[in-house]
Image (cartoon, helix red, strand yellow):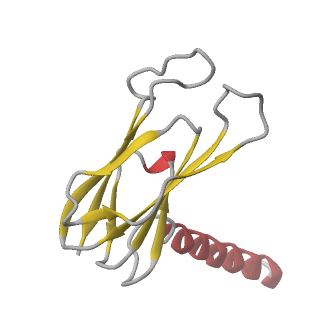
Amino acid sequence: MSMARASCRRLTAVAMVVSALSACGSAGSTGLGGQVTLTWQNKGHTVKVSRGTRIVVKLKSTYWHDFRSSKRGVVRRAGSVMRKPGDCPPGVGCGTVTVPFKAVGSGMAHIRASRTNCGEAFKCSKSQSRYDVTIRVS
């Protein structure tokens, strides 16, 4: 095996390890006072955070509403719902909704939201109409 080929394999292995480690921090655990952003991809998952963490829920579609925490002593809303319309005709619902929460106590809570429309005159299926992420605060 040539020296160049061996170096290339080592470099590839290092790149794979770095890539795997950086993926671990995306929406997993966060340190005290950090921030984690949750999206549709986090639906149905458990996210571990420390007390004091700012949790931002950012969902595509301006039809999302009723953002809430199942246990306000663990996770509570920390600001207003912000709607940013997208570049589409009225009634289509494109854009994003962003809602801040804060981890305030130890335990588990669910962050939930709902919607009935998934576009102009399109009713959402049951799985498309509910958003639920479990937050574990330590």
Q: Which of these two is toward me, 12 or 24? A: 24
Quadrant, the C terminus: bottom left
Q: Residue at x 29, y 78 (%)?
A: 51
Q: Quadrant of residue 131?
A: top left
- Residue 89: x and y in percent read 77, 28
Vertical position of residue 10 compared to residue 116: above or below = below
> Residue at the front extreme?
80
Pinpoint residue 15: horizontal percent, then vertical percent: 66, 74
The relative height of residue 114 versus residue 11 in the rendered view (above or below) is: above
Residue 34 appears in the rendering: yes
The residue lying at 46 percent from left, 64 percent from top is 27
Give the residue displayed 66% in from the left and 25% down from the top: 91
Give the side of residue 51 with respect to residue 21, left or right. left
Residue 34 shown left or right of residue 52 in the figure: right
Across and down, in percent, residue 108 comes to 20, 61
Q: Is residue 132 visible?
A: no
Residue placed most toward the observer, 1 or 33? 33
Q: Residue at x 59, y 15 (%)?
A: 121
Image position, residue 129 (x, y; %): 42, 29
Q: Quadrant of the N terminus?
A: bottom right
Number of dots carrying numbers: 0
